[in-house]
Image: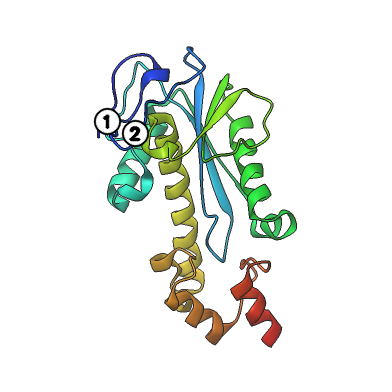
């Protein structure tokens, strides 16, 4: 995969599986927006927004899930050094429980968008729904594999949330958070049953609810 050269709205990731992506914006302050952490049983949902700088291209941007941890971390540094603007924001586990994961995800996205300086003028958001921001934009299904700015946002969000899980692993090594990153793997479910939910667990998620009911 490669990024085509040219104005930022044309920085599309070459991908034969998708039809051409038409973007209704021709300027340079286009922000890609993505999130990480909808599925885990613990911790915040993290979102990022990135406005790439056409004068400082970044090679290798693609869906963060397709990259190794080492490559993501290297690209995270490049994005922070070269982007015109970037921001990472989150919605806490308590907000996930209060709002539900869908609305908490959009809250984290809006927070990231609002933290951009300079501000964005147009949004490209990964997924099929816009997050309810006043800025114009469009949702792009599989956007992190289709547009460089969304890919960059996916990388920042993934690196930030993984770092949170590594920090949580240092506090609670018996749960294995550094390995499974909070997703409901067999290891995580077994640790949850053996040790019980932590304060950081999402109490509205069914596996956590079941363990709380046993207390």
Which residue position is annotated with label 2? 78
In the rendered view, tell whether residue 114 sits above or below residue 46: above
N-term mark: 1 or 2: 1
Residue at image x 27%, y 30%? Answer: 59
Query: Element type at marker 1?
Result: loop
Label 1 Cα neighbours within 10 Å, binned few <14 / some 14-19 / many ≥20: few
The image quadrant of residue 42 is bottom right
Left or right of 158, for residue 95: right
Considering every residue shown, the one lying at the far left of the view is 1
Counting from the top left corner in percent of width and height, residue 17 is at 31, 38
Counting from the top left corner in percent of width and height, residue 137 is at 57, 25
The image quadrant of residue 121 is top right
Residue at image x 44%, y 21%? Answer: 22
Q: In this orientation, does residue 66 appear?
A: yes
Residue at image x 55%, y 55%? Answer: 38
Counting from the top left corner in percent of width and height, residue 162 is at 44, 56
Label 2 Cα neighbours within 10 Å, binned few <14 / some 14-19 / many ≥20: some
Of residues 164 and 155, the one nearer the viewer is: 155
Res 59 label:
1
Query: Element type at marker 2?
Result: helix
């Amino acid at each position: 995969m490669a990024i085509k050269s040219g104005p930022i709205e044309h920085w599309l990731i070459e991908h034969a599986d998708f039809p051409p992506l038409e973007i209704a914006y021709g300027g340079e302050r286009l922000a890609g927006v993505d999130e990480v952490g909808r599925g885990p049983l613990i911790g915040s949902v993290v979102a990022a927004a990135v406005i790439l700088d056409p004068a400082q291209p970044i090679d290798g941007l693609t869906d963060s899930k397709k990259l190794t941890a080492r490559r993501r971390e290297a690209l995270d540094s490049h994005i922070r050094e070269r982007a015109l603007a970037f921001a990472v924001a989150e919605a806490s586990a308590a907000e996930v429980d209060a709002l539900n994961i869908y609305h908490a995800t959009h809250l984290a996205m809006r927070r990231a968008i609002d933290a951009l300086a300079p501000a964005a003028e147009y949004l490209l958001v990964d997924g099929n729904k816009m997050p309810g921001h006043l800025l114009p934009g469009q949702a792009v299904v599989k956007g992190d594999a289709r547009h460089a700015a969304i890919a960059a946002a996916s990388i920042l969000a993934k690196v930030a949330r993984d770092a949170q899980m590594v920090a949580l692993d240092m506090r609670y090594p018996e749960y294995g958070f550094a390995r499974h990153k909070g997703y409901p793997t067999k290891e995580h479910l077994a640790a949850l049953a053996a040790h019980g939910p932590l304060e950081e667990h999402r109490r509205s998620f069914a596996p956590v609810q079941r363990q709380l009911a046993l207390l």
